[in-house]
Structure formats: C-alpha cells, structure tokens
Image: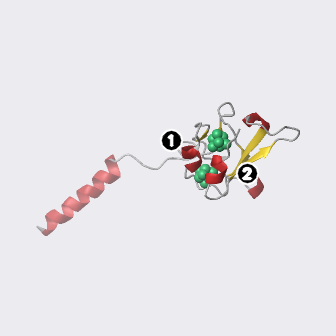
Amino acid sequence: MFITGILKGMWVTIKAALFRKNVTLQYPKEKRNRPYKGLQKVNANTCIVCGVCVRTCPVNAIKIELKLGHEKTRNANDYNFIVDTGSCMWCGLCEEVCPKHAIYLTNIYEMADYTKDKLTRKIN
Ligand code: SF4
Ligand code: SF4
C-alpha cells in the first residue's frame, strides 16, 4: 500500500517531466500569439474628438493636444493623441466607452524603455 502510493506519485512526476509540453517560451525569440491589452491606437477617421476616453481613464493616461497651427475642430487629424504607457494600467476602459469604437487596444506590448519620457507615446 505504502509502496503503491510512492510509485503513483513517481509516475505523475515522470509523466510531467517527460511528456508534458513546456509552457514557458524562449522570449524574445519565441512569442506567444494571443490577444493582449497592448498599446492603444486611435482611428482618426472615425474619432469625433469627444474626449470621453480622456475623462474616463482612471489614471489620466490619455491626452488630446491640439497640433501647432491647427484650429479646434472635430477632426482627430488636428490633434495628437498621447498615452503615458508608464501610467496606463491596460484596463481597456477607454476602448469600452468610445462611442465610435475609434480607440482600441492592440497586441503591441513591448514598450519597455530606459527613460520615463520615452514611455509617452503618440497613438494616432
Ligand atoms: S477616441 Fe473615442 S472616446 Fe476618444 S475622443 Fe475619439 S471618439 Fe471620443
Ligand atoms: S487602458 Fe485604462 S488606464 Fe490605459 S489609457 Fe485606457 S482607460 Fe486609461
């Protein structure tokens, strides 16, 4: 009875060691192919510059800045959409609330950098 228990336990360990497929990847050579909540992108053709995404973001990570020399309009091409990826917590609320589905999270997740200012990214 005691020996059977030990053999059963060993068999579980041997099976796992020899036959189970690895769950870890040799990153960055290998990358997992699945949807992520990554860097936002704004579709300037559908965005109406309502600012709902800015007001909804719980950490104030999104900024909409008027481009130099441009007039205030409802055209997203007149603005720079900027995300502070150092503050963003990838909750996806900006995507959820956008009335035009203009802002969405992409699969871009490799955003590490050496200085904090480089974490601020233009997304349109
Ligand atoms: S991305 Fe969506 S929520 Fe944000 S300003 Fe444009 S239309 Fe409004
Ligand atoms: S994913 Fe969340 S934290 Fe990041 S910008 Fe959108 S609302 Fe803000």
Question: Is residue 41 in view from this perspective?
Answer: no
Q: Which residue is mark 2?
A: 120
- 122 to the left or right of 55: right
Identify the element where label 1 is drawn. loop
Packing grade of label 2 (10 A; few <14, some 14-19, many >=20) is: some
Whether disc 1's CB lies below 8 Å from ligand 2 is answered no
Name the residue furthest bottom.
2
Q: Residue at x 34, y 53 (%)?
A: 17
Q: Residue at x 60, y 46 (%)?
A: 109
Q: Which residue is mark 1?
A: 35
Q: Residue at x 65, y 32 (%)?
A: 46
Packing grade of label 1 (10 A; few <14, some 14-19, many >=20) is: few
Number of callouts? 2
Identify the element where label 2 is drawn. strand
Q: Residue at x 61, y 53 (%)?
A: 56
| x, y percent for residue 101 | 58, 37
